[in-house]
Structures are given as C-alpha cells and as structure tokens.
Image: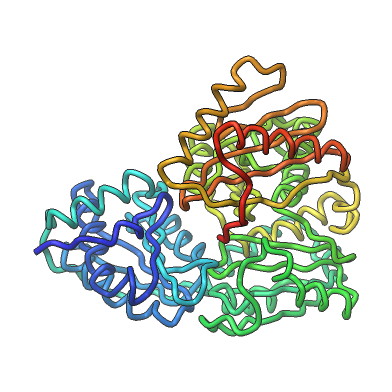
Amino acid sequence: MSHAFDPTILREYDIRGIIGETLEADDARAIGRSFGTLLRRAGGTTVAVGYDGRQSSPMLEHALVEGLTASGCNVVRIGLGATPMLYYAEASAEEVDGGIQITGSHNPPNYNGFKMVFQGRPFFGEDIQRLGEISAAGDWEDGTGSVSDRPLLDAYVERLMEGLDGIDRATLASLRIGWDAGNGAAGPALDKLVARLPGEHHVLYSEVDGTFPNHHPDPTVEENLADLRALVAEKNLDFGVAFDGDGDRIGAIDGEGRVIWGDQLLMIYAEDLLQRRKGATIIADVKASRALFDHVAANGGKPLMWKTGHSLIKSKMKETGSPLAGEMSGHVFFADTYYGFDDALYAGVRLIAASARLGRSVTQLRGAMPAMVNTPEMRFQVDEARKFAAIEEVKTRLADSPDQVDGTDGVRVTNADGWWLLRASNTQDVLVARAESDSEDGLARLMEQIDAQLAASGLERGPQAGH
C-alpha cells in the first residue's frame, strides 16, 4: 500500500487543497499514516487533532484519525475549534507529542487543509515534502492506536483570560468593544470569552458556518471589516477586533473606524511589553512598516526584520529568545507569558491589556502613529520557474547600489524616499511588491524603481493575483 498526493497540496507551511479535486478522505488518511510514522520514529506516541467549521472538516478528521491510529499513534480529539486551541492542546499537555488542525484558514469554502506541530516545533517545508515521500513509498509503521475525546474549550478560554492578570478590573469595566468572528472556528471560544471579560461586548457572526454567509473571513482585507466598522460607529464603541477563518490572525479597527494593520498592532504590543522587558528582541516580517522598527528601537527594544511565514517566524523566535513577533498578515506571536504561537483571540485580550497598562485608548494609540503613505500588498502572477530567479537578478543588479539593500526575504531597498520590497511568495506562483514613503511623490518614485527592476528582468506589474 502507498499513496501519491496531488503535488499542488504539499505547500511550504501547510497542506492545502480543493475538496473533491485535489484533496479527499484518502489524502487525509495517508497524512495521518505518514505523520504518525514520523512521530513514532522520533519517539512520540500521542497526537492532538482539531478541526475548523468547514463542511468538509468532519469527513477529513475521521479519515485522519484512522490514519494516525493505523500507524500506532494515540489520538486525542479536541473537536471543533480555532487553530490556536489545537496549538494550546499540544503546548499545554505533557503527554501530547504532536498536533494536527484541519483547516482551510481564510481560503474559499471549497478549500481545506492541515496545519501541523511536531514535538513542540512548527512542521513545514522539508517536513511536509518528507510526508509525501513516506506516503509515496508506503513506508509506514503499523499499529493500533487508541482514540479519546478531550473537550478543551473551557480550559482554553480560562488560559486566554490570564492575559489580563495584574490589571485592575475596575479600569476595564468601562470598555466597550466590538468583535467579528466571521462565522469562523473562533466563534464558540469568542462567545465564552466575552462572557468572562469585563466591560460591554458586541459580537458579530459567532455561529460557525463554513459557507461564510456574511463576509469572507480574512480580516486583513479592508472590505471584510465593513460590518465591524458599522457596528463600532453605530454603538460608539472603543474599538473592534476581527478574526480569520481559523482564529490565528487578527484584524482591528479603532473607535474612529481606522484600520489598525498588523505592523501597527505590533507597535502597540511592543510598547507595552518593552515597559517590562527592556532590550527584548521584537521580530517582524519584511513587509512591515519602517515606523514599527523605529518604534521598537525608540522604546528600548531590538527590532529584527525576518522572513514572511508563520513557521519561519516561530522558528526565529525560538532561536533568538524573542518574546514577541508579528506579521503584516495579522499573525501575532506572544512568548512572554504565553506559548509563542499565533493566537488571534489571545492577541485580542492583549490589546485590551496593552491599552490599560499604557493608560491610553486604542484610538489614541492608533492616532499617535506616524502617517505613512504606502501601497497594499501587490501580488502578480509570475511563472513558478521564474519567480525566485527574478529576485536573484534584482539582487545582482543592486549589488553596488548606494541604497540600503536587505536580502533577508526577497529584496527590501531603503533610500531617502522610504522603502520598497520585492519577494517571491513561498505558497503561490506570484511576486509580492510593497512600498512605503512619507509622501505621495516619494511613493511614486519608489514604484518607478520597482517597475524598472521588473522591466530589466522582462516582467511587469500585471494583473493583480488573488490570495
């Protein structure tokens, strides 16, 4: 027996495909067999399994559990929940050696996939390719594992509440906050959380519905925040928080309806944390604003620019001992008094805590940020075979440039006008561009530099590619 996966589903950070086309129950079973085999060979025995609210998730979970137990692993089923609840199960239970969450995250309803943790570390890149090799060879361990159910929702919400430890509840009692779960998997935990939080809370779309009837669950796209913005305006709330489909990415707006982007949230979290942890390393990805790196330094921290990708950031945090990291895409990682994984529900609690400790409203914190002129993330189709080569060509041409050139992840060029970035996506056949300046004229000049580099490689910023 062996199993060959559709090669498009074995991606850099996770496994993801289209139900009925590239992803079926047989794939889930083979993922279980192969992951279980790797874990047993590494001395592990027990895997936690959770799933999101997509209509295909229970079917995939059933097959995954069959595969894991057939490889001799014991399975702890935690049921329907957000991806961070699965991470919590893996991080907080001593006997659990690995974890798999079935989730399509923020992708369209007909997608689904798997995010994995292996003995406390992210499972990605070569690990995922290795799964494919083991499966294709049918090189599986055999056994008969046990299956047990462990409802975790109450314990998880209890742990989220610890983010407010040490803060006087009376100072929080006047808070008025809006929340939008987007019909994603964070809904049940959010309902329990707001019942416990001090203050007044208004919740949108906490019923789990994998067809996402109200709006697409991606809070980094501004149009998906329209309902939350209307709620905050109508009820005159202090701020609003939104989640993606599986609850590991946060979006936010202030009391005036302004979006607080991922790097701006990190500015707030960093200022709060650096009051207690002077000199700490704070990590952000290459897409983040210069204002963030400057803000971290101004508050006594060490800013570190790193590669985009939640698995890469988590690995870098472990290596550097960083207590806080984040990405433009809304993944935020707290490792000071939490476990270092990306949890948007916890990030929501920490936004309340930061505002209280800093003694300023979220709207004041957002209003104090420098006004930068920047582009959204621009994504355009480039052949898979060309995308990395094109970036290398740009690096070569800029080798003796007077500008500051950073090659951490793609090319980020800083000069008097601001900065621009070109990088190859790890998950799609696209190049990603972004630029930021303090003036419209400066931004236009930066865009000309991007276009000139693309033209020199025979490319152009063509039609925008979707996520």
Q: How is the image coloured?
A: rainbow
| Location of residue 291 (image quadrant) | top right
- Residue 409 in view, yes or no: no
Quadrant into which the N terminus falls: bottom left
> Residue 192 location, x and y as percent?
62, 78
> Residue 27 location, x and y as percent?
26, 68
- Residue 465 in view, yes or no: yes
> Residue 156 location, x and y as percent?
53, 67
- Viewer-closest of 270 and 137: 137
> Residue 336 location, x and y as percent?
61, 45
* Residue occupying the point 71% across, 47% down: 263
Q: Is residue 9 above or below residue 79?
A: above
Q: How many marks?
A: 0
* Residue occupying the point 71% across, 33% down: 449
Q: Is residue 436 above or below residue 20?
A: above
Q: Is residue 42 above or below residue 442?
A: below
Is residue 119 shown left or right of residue 407?
left
Is residue 322 shown left or right of residue 125?
right
* Residue occupying the point 69% across, 68% down: 242
Q: Is residue 150 above or below residue 429?
A: below
- Viewer-closest of 15 and 67: 15
Quadrant into which the C terminus falls: bottom right
Is residue 14 shown left or right of residue 183?
left
* Residue occupying the point 69% across, 22% down: 404
- Viewer-closest of 397 and 302: 397
